[in-house]
Image (tube, rainbow, N blue to C red):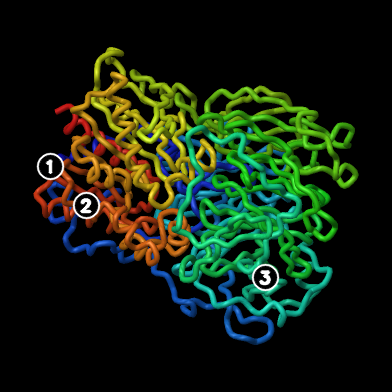
Amino acid sequence: MAADARNLTGAPEAVTEGALGRGGTSAGTGPAGSVPARGAAEGNAPSRSGPEGNALAGPAAAGHHLTADPRRTSGSAPSNAGGRPSANGSAAPPAPDGRGPAFAAPARVPLPDASGPRDATTRLIAHGCWYPSADPAGAQVAFICDRGGVPQLWVGPVDGDAPRLLDDGPDPVREVSWSPDGRWIAYTTAPGGGEQKRVLCVRPDGSDRHIMAGAEPGSSAHLGCWAHDGSAVAVTVAVPTEPAPDAAAEPALAGAGLGRAADRLSEHGHGPMGDAVLFDAVRLDTAPHADHGLALPSAPTDREPGIASPHTTVETLTTDALGVRHAAPTAGFGDGLSAYLVDPDGVTAPVLLATEQDAATLRVCDLSRDGTLALLRRGPRGRREAVVLRITDRVTTCVTPVADGDPWIGAFSPGADTLWLRSDAYREFAVLLAAELDPDGQPCGWSVGAARDYSDLELLRCAHDGSAAVLAWNVRGTSEVEIFDVAPTGATGASGAAGASGPSPGASRATAGTTETPSERSRLLLELPHEVVTRIADAGPGRLLLALSGSQRRPGIWWLPEGVTTVRTPWSSADEDAVPPGRPPVRPVHRRLTARDGVPLNGWYYRAPGRNPGEPAPCVIHLHGGPEDQERPVLEPLYHEILGRGVDVFAPDVRGSSGYGRSFVDSDLGEGRFAAIDDVADCAAHAVLSGSADPSRLAVMGRSYGGYLTFASLVRHPELFRTGVAVCGMSDFATFFQGTEPWIAQSAAHKYGHPERDRELLRRLSPMSRIDALRAPLLAVHGEHDTNVPPGESEQFVRAARERGLNAELLTLRDEGHDFLRADNRRLFRRAAADWLERHLTG
């Protein structure tokens, strides 16, 4: 494509989008009650490039041509995308018994203070605010905002209009968590815009800023929960590790809990700061399953019609005593993950809680008030599990399946006698699941606290006093939020919104074991000003914060004072500033259709403004990532740009998407992925047969897994699409598995197939195996530091297409990883994609 400079850069804009609301990407996760923005996973890779914000690959870069660079080898990642150390390539503390290094402990790295008045160098009129976390009193809120052109850490009064920038660094901020004692704000960043992360801490006034974990080359760190007294924060470090010490050889610290870290560590005489304390560490990958009393339904009653239970051979499974299949650990994949408790003051050494080898994820979601139990989330996507670890004697008391999506899966009641989980165990849709725990932390009974037909419980936030839980339900892509009284009638403690003030749920010991049904408990449905809730957080006693997105606005934060009326925070952008004046956002229309094999599909159709209803229009089928993501009716600036060029957008949920039941999510496993590719063609046919789309002017586009589907659709249905735009997509599963992060390979092996055992299946599924069928011109877009799907996946497809005489171009975005987080790069990407579609569909 000979694209001139105006199309690629353009004049500076005063408007840019907020957090990505769709498309299979960003890893926005956080304590109890947040939806990760697409494709989120617990790990990611640093690097930096020039300030221009874009790299035009190939020899014609100076002339603003987009070409593949022949010097880059197929499947290769950027040279400085963050090399991964070997098992003994980074310093690790010695075990207390004198044996060799076993774990890489988090290392504290001081940074310059961020105290004093600070502001963004660029003030964007339309900006996004998301991921709120309030101080204990609810007076101040830490949040992520892109008003400076990149997601950064801000703090502001919940009812005032004077926010302050706490970290003006160039690295995008991904998570935020204010400590329960109010002394610290923990947050994660993505160095260089890449896929690996660091966990940092800073005082609310900007002083004492330091890296807590993830500073070591090749490592990545993930934020966990705070201890309830604020003395420590849980952090997971991802690096290759040696096998964990033999549990039998480690001395038990009987009766030791997780009270104030300094007191506890001093009492047991552990080493100075910087030495990891192997305190009751346990290998979780050998823990037994203990689903006591949780019955298997005799027959599913809420399964979507037309969806059969999938059968696949692409994963290794074990079967527990209940006959339930669980994914067995897969040797050779994944990072070594170690979960620590870290003292933000730097007085005491990190405390090692648990470790897993060859693991996809490991996150500490909650600690009981008395410090005797820890709730962890582990496992690859589609096979997540909740693990209850009894800290005092290293015993895993419970392992049970939980739902994908938000990693903050649940919490303990104040007395640790009830465990609340967001789980789809043995069900089609996620529910509020309650486990009654005995004094030893063993489950002695299970019950469903709240459930809805054909709707997933998407977010769970629980009251500090154990009286109520705030539940967000996914109802066909939109959110419904209710405050649910989890304490039986007559129990002490406030109910409703007044109780929603802290991170732990559940009934008190006095009411445990009740047989009261969920219908007998009070529920309060909140009225929302916009369609989708992405996070629920406390704002002091009796108050909540909601992060909202919608089809008519940028991401923003709403305050719920005592009552049920939401109020927009003053520093969130106004609805009227969502897009430039003169062309309001398009509200999508929900569409239903049926695939060729009878499976029901859903999607959202955006009609370009100014076109007659019966006039067939050029149309692009846009495919989200995941594959388990879901298309949501939120403002997508990319769609707004494309619609402004006179091109319709149809954004469907093909099989494998979430929101329609577990069977639908799993229906693309193994050979079922061929049916998912055919779903793309069926969605295009629906757009044409409904009279909306012109059959001669169809395009396909997507990012991440949607980019893979774009490649695959162009080579499997070459007669259907006039052009395609593939963003960060896989083109060959063999090179993808060779180049991706180990933890991604662990999850991908369960989803797509094992790169060795299922080699032939993966070859047939790879678009590169059918490259000779490609007929349409193609634009590929990739972030230079993407270690999730390495840039070589786009490079090799573009190179092969050009070798066959086809028009294929590549746009590489500098200082970006799998997610495009910088305003200039996002604007460049939108304009380049819209220019390409306009040229090939309307020219």
Say left or right for 393 vs 173.
Answer: right
Q: What residue lies at 76% left-to-right and 33% top-to-bottom?
A: 518
Query: Of the residues under marks 1 and 3, which one precedes in the sequence?
Result: 1
Q: Position of residue 60 (x, y in %)?
A: 12, 52
Disc 3 crowd, CA 10 A, few/some/many (<14, 14-19, 20+): many
Reading the image, the residue beneath label 2 is 770
Q: What residue lies at 44% left-to-right and 64% top-to-bottom?
A: 742
Disc 2, SS = helix
From this view, report whether residue 208 is shown above or below residue 834. Answer: below
From this view, report whether residue 736 is shown above or below residue 310. Answer: below
Q: Are marks 2 and 1 in contact (CB under 8 Å)?
A: no
Query: Of the residues under marks 3 and 2, which one precedes in the sequence?
Result: 3
Q: Position of residue 208 (x, y in %)?
A: 60, 58
Q: Are marks 1 and 3 in contact (CB under 8 Å)?
A: no
Reading the image, the residue beneath label 3 is 282
Q: Position of residue 445 (x, y in %)?
A: 79, 49
Q: Please name the amino acid that badge 3 sits on.
A: Val
Say left or right for 787 vs 302.
Answer: left
Q: Nearer the viewer, mark 1 or mark 3?
A: 3
Frontmost residue, 270 versus 777: 777
Reading the image, the residue beneath label 1 is 2
In this orientation, does residue 147 appear?
no
Q: Position of residue 641 (x, y in %)?
A: 31, 30
Q: Please name the amino acid that badge 1 sits on.
A: Ala
**Number of the label disc, if any, that sits on residue 425:** none
Image-quadrant location for residue 482:
top right
Disc 1 crowd, CA 10 A, few/some/many (<14, 14-19, 20+): few
Q: Please name the amino acid that badge 2 sits on.
A: Arg
Disc 1, SS = loop
